[in-house]
Image (spheres, grey):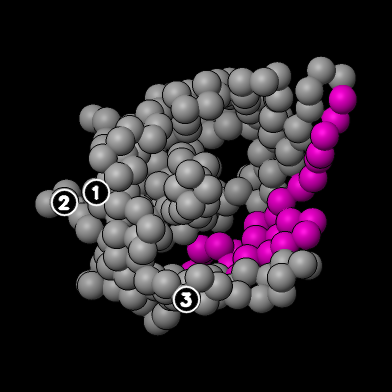
Amino acid sequence: MKNILLIVSTIILGLLTSCSNDDSNPDEAPLQLIKVYEQITMGTEIFSEGTVEYTYGLNGYLRLFTASNFSNKYLYNENDQLTELILTTESHGQSSSFYSYDEELITQSFDTVTDSKIFYEYNNNSQLVRVYHPYNDIRYEYDTKGNVSAIIVDSEIYNRFLYDDMKNPFSLLFPDAYNKIRGISYHNKIYSERDKEKTIFEYNENKYPVTSTKTIAGGYVIKREYYYNR
């Protein structure tokens, strides 16, 4: 079970296939998520709070992700394909993940910590449908809007999801190929069946979230504030 939880969380990123940004015009910089503030509480007690900051490269994609005790650095090739993720933590130092492509899709990744390879399989619509991991066989199902609707681990349903009709700000961070393997969907996840998570969003005029409140079984509440460059 520990392997399943670790692998699924590593592959999915909160489970939110990518969304194009249609809010820009020639006179404005592309819309970018630049900061997220998060607070976790139970009742009146604050368990943790902090801010994540996002820095972009000249290609418009995320270059640096900075939190209080770790950071991610993203490297791209001349085709703006993400080829390496460098994770730096206070406790474990530096590690890397490398990504290999077949034309526009990521077909393989290698992690230096686990010294293992992961292979990715797609359907005719270029949706990620299966991940071959050393420990688990993970499959994905999609709703009619292209969001990840279910995760199946070793032939058993691991989780199911519901989404809103608005725009997911995390789809702005990376190229489409990387969004696919991270499970970053078109819209914002409002319900996770496994942990009975429910999320309520408030949105701006561009249909992106400005706040979210997630309730988790057990009484925990996660509140976020989203900040953009415009």
Q: Is residue 123 above or below residue 73?
A: above
Q: Nearer the viewer, mark 1 or mark 3?
A: 3
Residue 76: x and y, percent?
46, 76
**Residue sticking out furthest to the bottom:** 78
Q: Can you name the residue that lies furthest to the left here?
A: 124
Name the side, left or right, on which 217 lies relative to 194: right
Chain part drawn in magenta: 45-73
Give the numbered dot on residue 129: 1
Residue 115 - label: 3
Q: Identify the element where label 2 is drawn.
A: loop
Q: CA distance from mark 1 to mark 3?
A: 24 Å
Q: Position of residue 64 (x, y in %)?
A: 63, 66
Q: Are marks 1 and 2 in contact (CB under 8 Å)?
A: yes
Is disc 1 placed on a helix, strand or loop? strand
For the point 16% across and 51% down, the residue is 123
Residue 115 horizontal side relative to residue 109, left or right: right
Q: Quadrant of residue 83?
A: bottom left
- Specify which label sits upstream in the sequence, 1 or 2: 2
Give residue 161's quadrant in the image: top left
Whole-number angstrom distance, CA of label 1 to CA of label 2 = 6 Å
Q: Looking at the image, can residue 54 be seen?
A: yes
The amino acid sitting under disc 3 is Asp
